[in-house]
Image: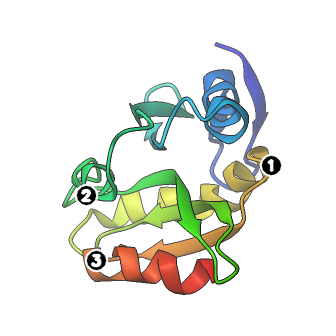
Amino acid sequence: MAFRGRNAQSGIGVAEQCKTIFTELQRKKVHRYVVFKIDEKKKEVSVEKTGGPAESYDDFLASLPESDCRYAVYDYDFVNAENCQKSKIFFIAWSPSVSRIRSKMLYATSKDSFRRELEGIHYEIQATDPTEVDLEALQERAK
């Protein structure tokens, strides 16, 4: 497996597929969202799930596990006050309060280096429960 680099704090690398899929979301609009997980055996961040361009924000929220951490990117399309179609990419660090402490620590120590691998993120949201990532939160940030 090809690694771009390893995080010095956590020892977690990033699978090359993560950048490839992110570029497809960013430039080609092939995906609406991507959910990433840390594979503790391989010691790398990998792609867990992708959502097609027609999938809704509810589909995205349903892909986040209730009791385990994940990273995700979501391509949010909206019309601004000047009636122009816009798109903003959100990075979401999902860390539910009920997840294992080891998982929370691993995701927290790997987040910054992983996020730096994904060039073109507009906003970041750290969320511990679904209310922190509801659609209104994205709408408010994207204004």
CA distance for labels 3 and 1: 26 Å
123 shown above or below 44: below
Residue at 59% in and 62% down: 90
Residue neighbourhood size for the residue with mark 1, other residues' Cα within 10 Å, grouped as few (<14), some (14–19), many (≥20) = few
- The image position of residue 76, as x and y in percent, is 53, 59
State the SS at label 1. loop
Q: Which mark is residue 14?
A: none
Tag nearer the camera, 2 or 1: 2
Label ID, residue 129: 3
Of labels 3 and 2, the one closer to you: 2
Residue at 43% x, 28% y is 41
Could you tell whether 47 is left or right of 69 in the image? right
Residue indicated by mark 2? 58
Instruction: Give the vertical position of 6 relative to 141 (above or below).
Output: above
Amino acid tagged 1: Glu
Picture quarter with the N terminus: top right
> Which of the 4 quarters of the picture holds residue 129?
bottom left
Whichever of labels 3 and 2 marks the residue nearer the N terminus, that label is 2
Snapshot quadrant of residue 131: bottom left
Three-letter amino acid code at the position of disc 2: Asp
**On screen, 6 above or below 93?**
above
Task: Check disc 1 and report the residue beneath it.
Answer: 119
The reply, left or right, for residue 33 in relation to residue 134 is right
The residue at the point 21 percent across, 71 percent down is: 98
